[in-house]
């Protein structure tokens, strides 16, 4: 297979939809947003590395059954740029403002890696707006977040000492599973790197990784969240072992942990169909008990 074709096989369609009106969430802030499907809402939360279009390949089946909402964080992608990087509290306000603007009373939050902290904060501050949480490869830990933040600091140093391509080469073997590394090979690596480089600027990544070091890391906060919670964890996640994943889920009053075989830190990259089936089953069971 020619190199260009091999890259295309692993390339994401990151094109933005034209003519989509932004949603005003707070004074001076408008967010780019995509809404697909109908019914119960699922709102995706970006982890500073993703943009709204990235989610299409990982929520296409969910959009057949639910309303999937994906948006660009403030200061990222096509959303408003402010001189000051938003705080976690302001990102939380944006989620609620987005729901208000779209006339969504309550939603499931689908978060990955660093954005699982945002999902936690929204659920704590606005429990009436959150139907449930899906936390894929969470940075939340049953004993705290020291290990997670140490790894994020290492990524930040690599970015600031070098560039985004070097950061990607640092991160790739850590967040991509062993099996995916072998199956993707060089073509998959280059294709995913192309998508990674297209979604963020050095400034955006610097700001996001800096913010990821902040916020309350206490596991006790999780015991206050009443919403049904699914921990979707790859058994090859570098940050959280299956044992720790089950311990984390046990902190939530209504939590569970599902282990995805041979998946890495972003488990829906390894098995998009299997991940979406887990989410669909979780939501259907949660709705049956409402």
Image: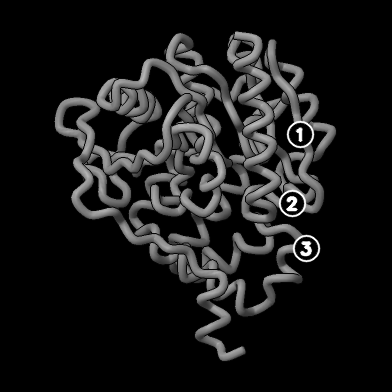
Which colour scheme appears in the figure? one colour
* Residue 69 at least partly seen: yes
Residue at image x 26%, y 50%?
78
- 42 sits left or right of 132 in the view: left
- 22 sits left or right of 252 in the view: left
| Mark sitting earlier along the chain (3/2) | 3
| Mark sitting earlier along the chain (3/1) | 3
- 102 sits left or right of 145 in the view: left
Query: Mark 3 to mark 2: distance in Å?
Result: 8 Å
Query: Mark 2 to mark 1: distance in Å?
Result: 12 Å
At mark 3, the secondary structure is: helix
Q: Residue furthest left?
A: 28
Q: Nearer the viewer, residue 47 or 261?
A: 261
Could you tell me residue 228's position as x and y percent? 63, 17
Residue at image x 15%, y 32%?
28
Which residue in the structure is indicated by mark 2? 263
The label shown at residue 258 is 1
């Amino acid at each position: 297979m020619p190199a260009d074709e091999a890259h295309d096989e692993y390339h994401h369609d990151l094109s933005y939809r034209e003519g989509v009106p932004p949603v005003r969430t707070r004074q001076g802030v408008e967010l780019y947003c995509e809404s697909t499907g109908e019914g119960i809402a699922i709102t995706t939360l970006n982890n500073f590395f993703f943009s709204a279009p990235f989610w299409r390949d990982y929520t296409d089946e969910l959009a057949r059954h639910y309303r999937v909402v994906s948006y660009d964080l403030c200061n990222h992608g096509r959303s408003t740029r402010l001189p000051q990087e938003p705080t976690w509290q302001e990102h939380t306000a944006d989620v609620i403002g987005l729901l208000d603007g779209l006339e969504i009373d309550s939603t499931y939050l689908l978060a990955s890696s660093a954005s699982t902290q945002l999902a936690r904060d929204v659920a704590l501050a606005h429990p009436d707006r959150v139907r449930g949480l899906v936390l894929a490869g969470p940075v939340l830990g049953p004993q705290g977040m020291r290990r997670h933040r140490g790894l994020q600091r290492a990524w930040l140093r690599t970015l600031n000492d070098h560039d985004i391509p070097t950061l990607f080469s640092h991160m790739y073997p850590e967040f991509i599973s062993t099996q995916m590394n072998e199956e993707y090979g060089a073509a998959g690596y280059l294709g995913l790197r192309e998508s990674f480089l297209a979604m963020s600027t050095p400034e955006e990544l610097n700001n996001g990784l800096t913010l990821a070091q902040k916020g309350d890391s206490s596991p006790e906060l999780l015991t206050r969240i009443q919403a049904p919670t699914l921990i979707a964890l790859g058994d090859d996640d570098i940050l959280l072992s299956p044992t720790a994943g089950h311990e984390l889920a046990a902190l939530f009053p209504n939590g569970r942990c599902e282990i995805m075989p041979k998946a890495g830190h972003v488990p829906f990259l390894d098995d998009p169909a299997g991940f979406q089936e887990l989410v669909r089953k979780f939501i259907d069971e949660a709705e049956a008990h409402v």
